[in-house]
Image (cartoon, grey):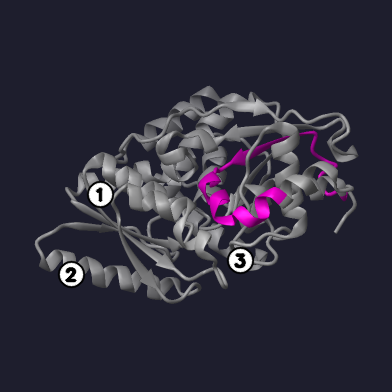
Amino acid sequence: MRAAAARAEKILANFPRARLAHTPTAFEKLALPSDAGAEFAGRGFFVKRDDCTGLAMGGNKARQLEFYLGAARAEKCDAVLGTGAGQSNFLRMLAAGAARLGMECHLQFEERVENPNADYRNSGNRLLGEIFGAHAHGYPAGEDEGGADAAMEERADALRRAGRKPFVIPLAPGHAPIGALGYVDAAVELGRQMDGKIDLVVIGSGSGLSHAGLLVGLRLQNIKIPVLGVCVRRAAAAQRERVLLHCGLLAEMLGGGLKIDESDVWVDDSALAPGYGAASERVWRDIGMLAARAGLLTDPVYSGKVFSCVFELARRGGLDAFRNIAIVHTGGLPALFAYREKVARAHIMGVSAPRERD
């Protein structure tokens, strides 16, 4: 396994990279009290702390941005453009990375969440983007990736006419999945930390880049354990297709003939409802439980849904084949401030609510 990890690192060294993240991130056992629930008895839950990557309050996007901004710097670009939701973790960290590297940053905010309140529009990730000095732009749709990319290209053309050299980070699939390289690197880290003792890895699956990078990175090291992607943006069938496309393009970038089959792309959308940027009562309850009983903060868009999905699958017997489970905590914590009205109630539910199924 060491030789395979070294080979993966040698391949990654061929790609330009801007060091932004504090890595390796910690790998620790999730400590829960004995009365947390029968589903936790006899099973080990471990957390890969990618919420602690350092840049702009942390999160998995720092790993992706090392390669995106590395590519931008290699092309001698002086401006960078990205698109995402109003509380996008990616855009918050893009603004910070661009500021660190001296690049002008343009953030395009899409309308993905229905009836957002003032906190959602002005606090959390959105506020941090302003602090980092990024230029904010709006896009009126929330499920139009092609249109959002086209709007960024129009803005990039305007920058070119003004004498700038912009770098556009596309949203829609089909482009070279440069950001996924960050999770090939994370897979090398994780492979060493697991030391053969983990039999399932779980990660949130939104854009699909982190999921694809992790899966390809583990397989590149001949680590065959299953990888479960928890859907946070779209239903399982569409997400599986997206991740599989990313995996194919990523494998081509890396070379070596690696192939990921559809059967290897495991996704679960049971925690997705009521949709992107919104969370069910069960998810909020588990967010509250993790905070009040384990001192671990998770958010309702990504990490909260990931942990809640794993816990519910365990409650229902869906993970009986796995005894030691590693969950990649991808961060997203600034978004908690955008859901201020629900946070106090989540604490109450997490401490006192019965453990019945929804």
Which of the two residues, 271 or 289, is positioned nearer the viewer here?
Answer: 289
1 or 2: tag closer to the N-terminus? 1
Q: Is residue 310 visible?
A: no
- Residues at circles 3 and 1 in contact by the CB criterion of under 8 Å: no
Residue 26, by quadrant, is: top right
In the current view of this chain or complex, which residue is farthest to the left? 163
Q: Position of residue 84 (x, y in %)?
A: 44, 62
Judging depth in this view, the residue of 53 and 137 nearest the camera is 137
Task: Report the number of discs.
Answer: 3
Residue on which the image places disc 2? 158
Quadrant the N terminus occupies: top right
Q: Is residue 188 left or right of residue 14?
A: right
Task: Give the label on residue 234, or none.
Answer: 3
| Helix, strand or loop at mark 2 | helix
Q: Which residues are magenta?
A: 316-344
Residue 252: give x, y in percent of width and height.
42, 52
CA separation in Å, label 2 and label 3: 32 Å
Callout 2 crowding tier (Cα within 10 Å): few <14, some 14–19, many ≥20: few
Horizontal relation, residue 43 to residue 135: left or right: right
Residue under the point 17% across and 48% down: 76
Name the residue tied to disc 1. 72
The spot of residue 193 in percent (x, y) is 59, 25
